[in-house]
Image: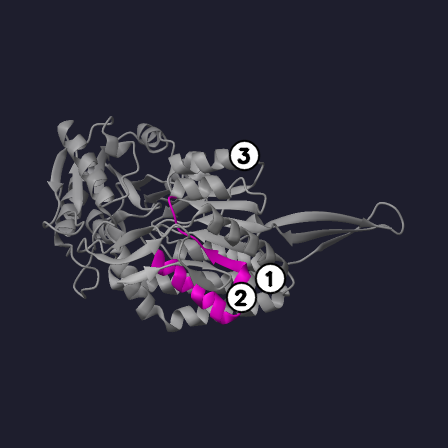
Amino acid sequence: MQDYKLLIDGEERVGGAGHWQDVLNPATGEAIGRVTHATTDDLDDAMNTALRGLTEWRSVTPWQRGAILKKSADILRSRKEDLGLAMTHEQGKPLREAIAEVDRSADFMEWGGEQARRITADGLIGRDIGNRIVIERHPIGVVAAFTPWNFPMALAAKKFAGALGAGCSIICKPAEETPASVLGLVQALLEAGVTPATVGVVFGVPSEVSSYMIPSPQISKITFTGSIPVGKLLAAEAGKVMKPVTMELGGHAPVIVCKDTDPEALADYLVPKKFFNAGQICICPTRFFVEDEVHDRFLDRFVARAKEIRVGDGALAETQMGPLASEKRLQAISGLVEDARARGADILTGGHRVGNSGNFYAPTVLANVPNDAKILNEEPFGPLAPVIRFDDEDEMLRQANGLEYGLSGYLFTNDASRQRRLSDALQVGTVGINDIPTHIPEVPLGGWKESGYGTEGGQSILEPYQKTKFVSQR
């Protein structure tokens, strides 16, 4: 049993009210620790400390900030086996996936450090003789970051890398289900040389923490990764006090399989992508639109490969897919399948819980799913793959683009003109052509429509955490 505490000014502390919440291993359902909840006094301390940390950290030169962030990346890589195992125990994903996430988190810290060293001020010659203009970029202030449980370290690392690289201080409120991952990340940052007041971690009832922190005058910027409904609530609260937000929200990615592909080879490629992290990924391929000529061959191979996936405890070497992260997710997935079944969909494999303990759910493939089924209209966020036959491209695109989601979409064809036409038509922020890409640090990720606004990563990773100043001098 591990106690996970608040981290304020480099010191661990128990929340003032002494309230604790169990941290459960999703593979067993057993408590592996407990996490303390912050009171409003604790949150005030965290924000006041971060305000002091802002002054300290922005006085560190961008070159030195870059060196510190790159050192934190080296520390993370040196601990990836231990940090990965802790992540597997609290989140459930297979150990190799967890270790890879620690590596990717390190990549984000390194990228943020590299971009910090490229902060520039743009100079212009004024319209009048003797006039010089400079456009400066300054840290926006104290950042409040709210991060989810599905990629508990990598999704936090993106925010820490951008905020710290820009010179901001940051307070992170991670998911209470997965506290160890963010605390391990922040410990690496502190050991690398980030000033203690600059980074904080708090836990508590999500709605209570966000409603208290967002209006606070100490907070200048909000960044959130999570569901569309929660994102809308946070954005509305931020709008009341005119604070900028970055929102990476839900997705329901269409996958378009065209008739000129090799359907068996493509099914072999897509099954591991679909069931990675038990399908709990915002950019996960979720709705498979398969052209009539190759539909049956693709579906047969996809089902056969899904049946082969070994489901089990992520700490075991033979496991290919771990449990869902919580009992709540298990019930949500079961509800989507039962709704589809009641509406006449065919469950070709899976469609049931695995075992009597833990949050295991079988990889599930559905066919003949009616358009009004919840699974085609709500983000499933789990190991469910509805396969939809199409023979009319325009109608297929109408369905693919017909939801509020616009995070990602994928298409598979060797026809160059069709690649361009379908890529242009998809109303999403990320498109994979014959590819299911991962969000790596050097590319920006952001959603269209209700999947959010703003981007994280890429050449502009620092921009959400900067404000500009126009200086004119004679």
In the image: residue 428, left or right of residue 214: left
Rounded to the nearest whole Å, what is the CA distance between mark 3 and mark 1?
27 Å
- What is the basis of the colouring in this image? one colour
Give the residues drawn in magenta, as a range.
179-205
Residue 336: give x, y in percent of width and height: 21, 35
Q: Where is residue 264 in the image (x, y as percent from the top left)?
A: 19, 50
Q: Vertical placement of 234 versus 398: above or below?
A: below
Q: In the image shown, does 312 or 174 lie closer to the viewer?
A: 174
Q: Name the residue under label 3.
A: 239
Question: What's the magenta bit mostly, secondary-structure-wise?
Answer: helix
Left or right side of 52 for 406: left
Residue 381 % position (x, y): 28, 43
Residue depicted at x 60% and y 57%: 52
* Label at residue 57: 1
Asked whether, in this view, residue 274 is left or right of residue 415, the answer is left
Residue at 45% of width from left, 39% of height from top? 452
Q: Name the residue under label 2.
A: 194
Q: Can residue 150 be seen in this view?
A: yes
**What amino acid type is highlighted by mark number 1?**
Trp
Q: Position of residue 217 (x, y in %)?
A: 59, 43
Q: Quadrant of residue 431?
A: top left
Q: In which quarter of the image is residue 393?
A: top left
Callouts 1 and 2 close, C-beta under 8 Å = yes
**Amino acid on which the number 3 mark rests in the picture:** Gly
Q: Is residue 114 left or right of residue 328?
A: right
Q: Residue 275 shows which numbered tag?
A: none
Q: Residue furthest bottom?
A: 78
On screen, residue 411 above or below 461: above
Residue 193 on the magenta segment: yes
